[in-house]
């Protein structure tokens, strides 16, 4: 006659924090099902259920119930986590991965490749000649994804090259944020950003209107009818724009724009008017500031650093103008083009809204500190 030995299930007594944690896991909608099952096994065991009863209650087998019951008894909450698995032995060490990342961060010209940027296939092509065994393209793609390296993408960037960049840009950024020489601007101060959008081409081409599931279609071929320049000034505090279309971007035309803006009530009634421009020929620092001071006693002229047009708020308006009024348009004459630009200006000024500028002097300082020195 044979005898059978049965083991007594491990007894579990939960503290209040442990019970609260396990119940939270069970209630959490985003918790993995494996974690929910293990937590429910422990909770039922703490209520006195044996392994057979737990298996029937949770629709699992007794072996599963016994495993997680015993694991929790031995090591507590950490015992409910999966143990590390050995997995497949690594084929490539960290050196190979580092070489692939370094290769992806090189410019193609460094290896005399007739390419402007590298793709996964290009990187694999070069790696085959240098690494044996070489990782597959899919492995290279996975490594680069983990390292957040995307050599096939391109973005534009302007490196500050003016040695006095910070000194010239700081007063402009302070004006945008409401201060001048450390003092807050008053209601009697007006800030004006001005520049020109040059070489706007009048092109006529066939267009098909949009429809359900079909965007606006613009014919690739077009007829040219000349071009113009749009000189404009933005009142930073109100968002209003005053501009003029001219055939030539001359100093005389730009000075006429200044006179037009300064004749507006907002400028005539101002205690101080700050004019912000870049270093274009029609408003060059050597002549424009002196002309402003001669013409107007309450005007302060500021010039941005070279290559810093992105700090001129009028460029934001030019961007909106391009997207909403010019891109995909058809103009059979310069007059039609000028009429479109002037019409958009009227539409904009019907409900003007200032741009929300958040870039500060401190942001600029942090940027310049991160950039390498430019010779």
Image (cartoon, helix red, strand yellow):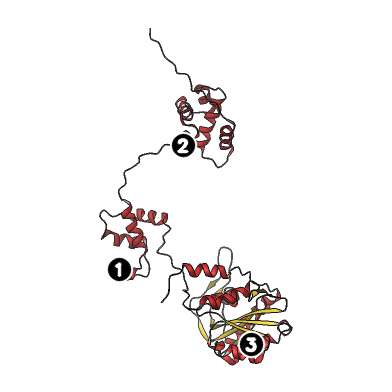
Question: Which quadrant holds residue 128?
Answer: bottom left
Q: In what element is the residue under mark 2?
A: loop
Q: In this view, does 179 lie to the left or right of 33?
A: right
Residue at 38% in and 54% down:
143
* Residue occupied by mark 1: 111
What mark, if any, has residue 81 been given in the picture?
2
Q: Distance between the residues labelled 3 and 2?
A: 72 Å
Camera-near label (3 vs 2) is: 2
Q: How crowded is mark 1: few (under 14 residues within 10 Å), some or many (20 or more)?
A: few
Residue 78: give x, y in percent of width and height: 48, 35
Q: Which of marks 2 and 1 is nearer the N terminus?
A: 2
Q: Nearer the viewer, residue 41 or 273?
A: 273
Q: Which of marks 3 and 2 is nearer the N terminus?
A: 2
Q: Is residue 367 left or right of residue 187?
A: left
Q: Distance between the residues labelled 2 and 1?
A: 48 Å
Question: Which quadrant holds residue 337?
Answer: bottom right
Q: Is residue 327 visible?
A: no
Q: Nearer the viewer, residue 175 or 11?
A: 175
Residue 6: give x, y in percent of width and height: 44, 16
Q: Is residue 124 left or right of residue 280?
A: left
Residue at 47% in and 19% down:
8
């Amino acid at each position: 006659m044979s005898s059978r030995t049965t083991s007594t299930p491990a007894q579990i007594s939960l503290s209040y924090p442990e019970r609260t944690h396990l119940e939270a896991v069970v209630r959490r909608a985003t918790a993995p099902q494996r974690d929910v099952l293990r937590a429910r096994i422990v909770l039922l065991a703490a209520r006195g259920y044996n392994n057979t009863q737990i298996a029937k209650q949770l629709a699992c087998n007794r072996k599963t119930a016994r495993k997680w019951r015993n694991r929790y008894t031995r090591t507590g909450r950490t015992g409910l986590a999966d143990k590390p698995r050995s997995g497949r032995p690594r084929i490539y060490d960290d050196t190979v991965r580092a070489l692939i990342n370094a290769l992806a961060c090189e410019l193609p010209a460094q290896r005399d490749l007739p390419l402007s940027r590298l793709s996964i296939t290009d990187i694999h092509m070069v790696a085959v000649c240098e690494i044996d065994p070489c990782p597959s393209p899919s492995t290279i793609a996975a490594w680069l994804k983990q390292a957040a390296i995307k050599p096939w993408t391109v973005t534009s960037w302007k490196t500050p090259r003016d040695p006095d960049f910070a000194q010239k840009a700081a007063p402009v950024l302070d004006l945008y944020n409401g201060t001048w020489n450390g003092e807050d601007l008053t209601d009697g101060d007006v800030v004006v950003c001005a520049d020109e959008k040059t070489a706007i081409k009048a092109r006529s081409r066939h267009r098909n209107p949009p429809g359900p599931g079909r965007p606006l279609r613009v014919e690739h071929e077009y007829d040219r009818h000349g071009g113009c320049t749009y000189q404009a000034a933005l009142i930073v505090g109100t968002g209003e724009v005053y501009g003029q279309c001219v055939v030539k971007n001359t100093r005389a035309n730009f000075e006429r724009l200044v006179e037009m803006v300064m004749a507006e009530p907002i400028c005539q009634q101002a205690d101080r008017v700050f004019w912000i421009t870049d270093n274009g020929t029609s408003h060059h620092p050597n002549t424009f500031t002196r002309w402003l001071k001669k013409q107007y006693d309450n005007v302060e002229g500021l010039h941005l650093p070279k290559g810093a047009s992105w700090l001129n708020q009028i460029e934001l308006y030019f961007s909106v103008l391009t997207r909403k009024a010019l891109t995909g348009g058809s103009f059979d004459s310069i007059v039609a083009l000028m009429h479109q630009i002037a019409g958009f200006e009227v539409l904009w000024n019907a409900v003007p809204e200032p741009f929300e500028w958040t870039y500060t002097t401190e942001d600029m300082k942090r940027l310049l500190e991160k950039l390498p020195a430019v010779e």
